[in-house]
Image (spheres, rainbow, N blue to C red):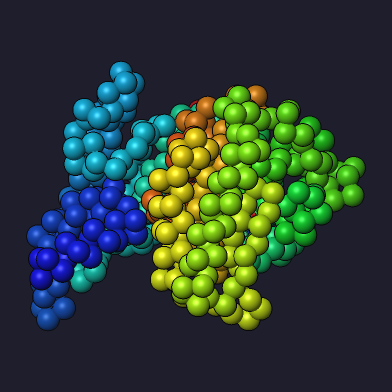
Amino acid sequence: MTTRYRVEYALKTHRRDQLIEWIKGLLAVPFVLHSHPTAVFEPDGESVDLQASVSQRRYAEIMRDVEEIINDHIAHQKVGKPDRSKLKLLVPTVGNFFTSLALHDAFIWQDQRRFISYRRFVPPSFNDIRLVLNTAQVMSLVRSGPLELITFDGDVTLYDDGNNLTPDNPVIAKILHLMRRGSKIGIVTAAGYTEAKRYYERLFGLLNALQTSNLPLESKQNLIIMGGESSYCFKFDGNSPDMLRLVPREDWLLKEMLLWTDSDIKELLDIAEASLKDTLRSMRMEGIIVRKERAVGIIPKEGHKFCRETLEETVLIVQKILDISEVGQRLPFCAFNGGNDVFVDIGDKSWGVLACQRIFGGIEGGKTLHVGDQFLSAGANDFKARLACTTAWIANPLETCQLLDEIAELDEMQQRKTR
Ligand code: IMP
Ligand code: MG
C-alpha cells in the first residue's frame, strides 16, 4: 500500500497544491476529534449548534496559526531569506506572498456560507480551503487600501471554456462596478490573436456594455486586453470599429522582454512543434497542429474530444523537452492544457500581468489581483501570475461572480468603517 501511495504521489505532484493539502491536513485533526457522526443515532445528544460552534472555534484557531506562520514567512521574504522560514520547511513548494492573508476572518466568513463546522461526515475539503484562501486574499487587499488592478483570465474564469463573453453574462455589471470604484481591469488570456476583431468577437458583451455605460471617458480607458499570455496588448477605444486599439509593443514591453529575439522564438516553437507532432502521432490523437507567430498548439478535429490523460501527457512531454533545451532556459514559455487543446505560448501570464501593471503606471503586486482557473504547477497557465501579484483560484465563471460580489461587500463594509 505504502509503495503504491508513494508512486501515486510522485506522479501526481503536478495535480496537487501543497499549501492547500497542508492546511487540509491540519483541519482534519479537529474534524476527527470534534465532529460527532454518531449524533445522528442519538437525538438527545449535544445540540448541532453547540457542536458546530466548538468545531468552528478550533478550525478558526488553526487558521489564525497558519496566518501567523505566513506572516513569519513574509518577514523572512522581506530580509531576503524566504528559504529559512518555518513555512518553507513545512511546504517546500510555497512561493512568495504579496500580502498577509486574513485566514481567521475568512474562515468564519466562508463557514457562515458553507457550514463547514456543521458537517459530521465530510471534513474540510480542498474546495473549502481554496475558497477560504480566496476570501482571505480579498479581505487583506480591501483592508489595506484600494484594489488598484484586477486581471482576469478568459476561458472558464469569465465564460465557459471556448465560449464568448456575451451580453447576458452577469460578470459584466460586476466588472463595470469595479471600474466605477476606480479599479483598472486587464483581461490576461492565452487566446492569441493579432487583430482586434477576434478579441471583439470573444468579448463583445463587455466591450459593448462599457461603450454604452455612463462611465467617464477617462475610466473607460482603464480596460486592457493582454492576449497570447503576454504578446498582444489592446486598449479599449470607443472610436475604433472593434472598440479596441492595438498598443504597439514598443510602448509597453518590459526591458527583459526586449531580449526575446525572433530567432529564439522560432527555435523554441520549432522544438515544441516537433514534440507535439510526435505525441499527436503516438497517442493517435484526432487533432491538428496550429502554428502561430508566438504559439503552437494541438486542437481537436471537428467534433472530437481529447481525454484529460492524453492532454496532460502531451503537456508534460513538451514541457520536459523544452525545459531541457537551451533555448527553453533563456526564453519564458508556457505549456498548458486548455481543456480540449494544448498550447505552448511564448511568455507567460506573469509577464502579462507585469505589463498591465506597467501600462497603468506601475501598480504593485500587493495592489493587484489575478483571477483564474489554472493554478496547478504544471500544465496550467494562471499559475505563473503568482510571480507578479496576488491571486484568486476559481473553478467556474459563477465563482468569479461570487468573488466579485464578496469584494463589493467587503469594500462597502470598509467604506462604512472609515466614514
Ligand atoms: P484562457 O483561459 O483565457 O487563458 O484561454 C485559453 C484558451 O485560448 C486555450 O485553451 C485555447 O483554446 C485558446 N487559444 C486561442 N489561441 C491561443 C493561443 O495562441 N495560445 C493559447 N491558447 C489559445
Ligand atoms: Mg482559463
Give coordinates of residue 37: x percent, y percent.
14, 72
Give coordinates of residue 71: x percent, y percent.
28, 30
What is the tally of numbered marks visible in this picture? Answer: 0
Q: Residue at x 74, y 62 (%)?
A: 167
Q: Residue at x 63, y 81 (%)?
A: 303
Tell me the quadrant of the picture where the C terminus can be found: top right
Say left or right for 234 vs 83.
Answer: right
Q: Residue at x 58, y 65 (%)?
A: 298
| Residue 197 falls in image quadrant | bottom right
Q: Using the rendered image of the protein, determine whether residue 417 is visible from the camera's viewpoint.
A: no
| Residue 286 falls in image quadrant | bottom right
Say left or right for 378 vs 198.
Answer: left
Q: Is 307 above or below relative to 97?
A: below
Give coordinates of residue 134: x percent, y percent.
42, 48
Q: Using the rendered image of the protein, determine whether residue 271 is visible from the camera's viewpoint.
A: yes
Residue sitting nearer the eye, 194 or 319: 319
Say left or right for 311 vs 23.
Answer: right
Tell me the quadrant of the picture where the N terminus can be found: bottom left
Q: Residue at x 29, y 47 (%)?
A: 19
Give coordinates of residue 277: x percent, y percent.
55, 65
Q: Is 407 above or below relative to 41?
A: above
Say left or right for 267 vs 337.
Answer: right
Residue sitting nearer the eye, 104 or 134: 134
